[in-house]
Structures are given as C-alpha cells and as structure tokens.
C-alpha cells in the first residue's frame, strides 16, 4: 500500500516538474526582463545626473541613450499575456480590454515625470521642479485618455490608488523616524525616493508572478506603471492625486459613457 502511495507521489511530482519546465522559458524571460529594465532605469538616472553637470562631457547623454535602449529591450523581451477567451451565449468572443496595446506614451511620460521629480527633490533644483510642473499636463492628458476613454478604468484605478497609498504610508513612517525634511541629509532624500518606488515594484512582481494570467492583468499593469509619478511625491502628492481622480471620473462620466450610450442607441 505504501509502495502505491509512493508511486502516486512520484507521478504527481513528475507532473509538477514537467509543468514547471514547460513554463520555465516564460518565467526566465520575465526575470531577465525585470532585471534588464531595472538596470536600464538605473543607467538612465545616472546619465541624467551627469548630463546636468556642466563639468562632464557627453558621457551623461550616452548613458541616457543606453538606458533607454535597455528599457526598450526589456519591454520587448517581456512575454505577452495569454488568457483563455470566453464565449458568450451567441458563440461570439466578447471584446476584451486586454487586447488594447500597452500605452507606451503614458509609460514614457510616467518614467520621465518620476525621474525629473526625484532629481529635483534630492538636489533642490528649482529648474527641474519647474520642468516637472510644465510637463505634468502632458502626463495628465495621457493618463486621462488611457483611463477615462478606454475600458477597465476601475481595474486600473485599484492598483493605481493602492500603489500611491502604500507610498504615502512609507513617507509617513519615514517622516516619523527622521522628522521634517528640513533636517534630512542628502542620503535620506535619496533613500526616500528609492523607498517610494518600492510599492510599484512589489505590486508589479505580485501581478506578473503570483497572479493567474487573465484579462485584468494588463489593466493592473497599466495602473501600476501610471502611479510612479504620484508615488515619488508621497503624501504631498495628495494635493494633485485627489483632483486627478475627480477629473478622471468626470471625464469618464461625461465623455466615455455618453459615447457608449450614443453607440447603443
């Protein structure tokens, strides 16, 4: 009897091993893509720091280009989401929101806004903070277009809000430990910026590796990426975050829903 149980356990372990090996290529591509993307972001941030230093040569510009190429390569290497399609009662496939292409413009603006704010906040450069304020309307237009005028707004807003809420919690704990920012050192300013992007990174790992593939997964991915500029602003960004949610809701109400009702009629 024990021999039969051992055989069953061996067969079960064999099936698990085969299944893991079958999916190993996709997991390997995801791991390599994450590492390559993080390395590209680090290289690009370092290049921006050198580019704003007048005493350096073209090294900063070269590093920025290399970082962008690495990030683009990581995006291309990432495996496409595959999910089972469900048929409705008429035997037709319902329109899936996951078929929407990944918003490259929104992603690029999100990364640029994050980098500019981080550098301006850590160095106290008013020119960088002014540039951040100037390009923020472009980011908000991209955000509103993707969230309000496409399907799955609520599914995007949940990780979008959760990521910023966790970043605010990190800021509160950091503030309690080290006091007001007027007393922070340069290392502490850099530390809070790195800690602020931990929630998007953790949520991305959870969404890609620990959640079963579905039509909601790409929508959550967009919401997490779009939350980066608000995460680095911490609870100070609530001044912009709450009006942004209101504007997104109003845009959805007056434009998208009206357009859908017009199509139905």
Image (spheres, helix red, strand yellow):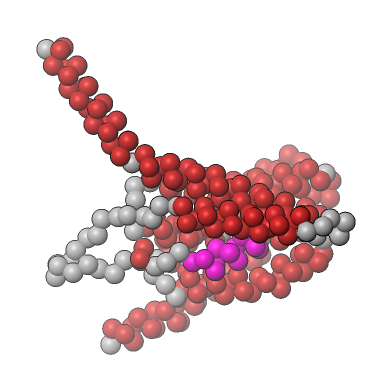
Q: In this view, does 248 lie to the left or right of 170?
A: left
Residue at x-position 13% and y-position 16%: 4
- Residue 146, above or below 264: above
- As drawn, the residue found furthest toward the top would be 2
**Residue 178 in view in this figure:** yes
Residue at x-position 73% and y-position 60%: 61
Image quarter hosting the N terminus: top left
Q: Is residue 130 left or right of residue 55?
A: left
Residue 187: give x, y in percent of width and height: 78, 43
Q: How many numbered discs, if any?
A: 0
Residue 169: give x, y in percent of width and height: 62, 47
Residue at x-position 30% and y-position 39%: 22
Q: What segment carries the magenta color?
A: 103-113
Q: In this view, does 172 lie to the left or right of 160?
A: right
Q: In this view, does 225 lie to the left or right of 123?
A: left
Seen from the viewer's position, the closer of residues 210 and 65 is 65
Residue 48 figure quarter: bottom right
**Residue 114 in view in this figure:** no
Residue 145: give x, y in percent of width and height: 50, 74
- Does the magenta stretch mainly form a helix, a strand or a loop? helix
Residue 151: give x, y in percent of width and height: 39, 70
Give yes or no for residue 23 being in the magenta stretch: no
Residue at x-position 76% and y-position 48%: 189
- Residue 154, above or below 2: below
Give yes or no for residue 108 being in the magenta stretch: yes
Image quarter hosting the C terminus: bottom left
Seen from the viewer's position, the closer of residues 256 and 85 is 85
């Amino acid at each position: 009897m024990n021999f039969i149980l051992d055989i069953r356990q061996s067969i079960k372990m064999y099936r698990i091993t085969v299944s893991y090996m079958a999916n190993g290529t996709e997991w390997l591509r995801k791991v390599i893509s994450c590492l390559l993307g993080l390395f590209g972001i680090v290289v690009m941030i370092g290049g921006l720091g050198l580019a704003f230093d007048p005493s350096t040569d073209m090294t900063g510009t070269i590093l920025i280009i290399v970082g962008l190429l690495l990030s683009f390569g990581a995006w291309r290497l990432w495996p496409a989401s595959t999910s089972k399609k469900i048929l409705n009662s008429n035997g037709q496939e319902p329109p899936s929101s996951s078929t929407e292409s990944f918003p490259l413009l929104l992603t690029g603006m999100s990364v640029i806004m994050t980098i500019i704010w981080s550098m301006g906040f850590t160095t106290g450069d008013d020119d960088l903070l002014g540039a951040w304020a100037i390009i923020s309307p472009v980011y908000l237009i991209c955000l509103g277009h993707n969230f309000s005028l496409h399907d799955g707004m609520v599914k995007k807003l949940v990780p979008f809000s959760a990521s910023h809420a966790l970043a605010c919690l990190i800021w509160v704990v950091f503030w309690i430990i080290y006091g007001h920012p007027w007393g922070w050192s340069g290392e502490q300013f850099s530390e809070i910026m790195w800690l602020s992007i931990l929630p998007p990174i953790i949520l991305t790992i959870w969404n890609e590796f620990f959640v079963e593939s579905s039509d909601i997964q790409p929508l959550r991915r967009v919401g997490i990426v779009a939350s980066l500029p608000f995460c680095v602003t911490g609870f100070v960004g609530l001044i912009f975050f709450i009006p942004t949610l209101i504007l997104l809701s109003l845009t959805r109400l007056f434009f998208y829903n009206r357009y859908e009702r017009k199509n139905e009629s």
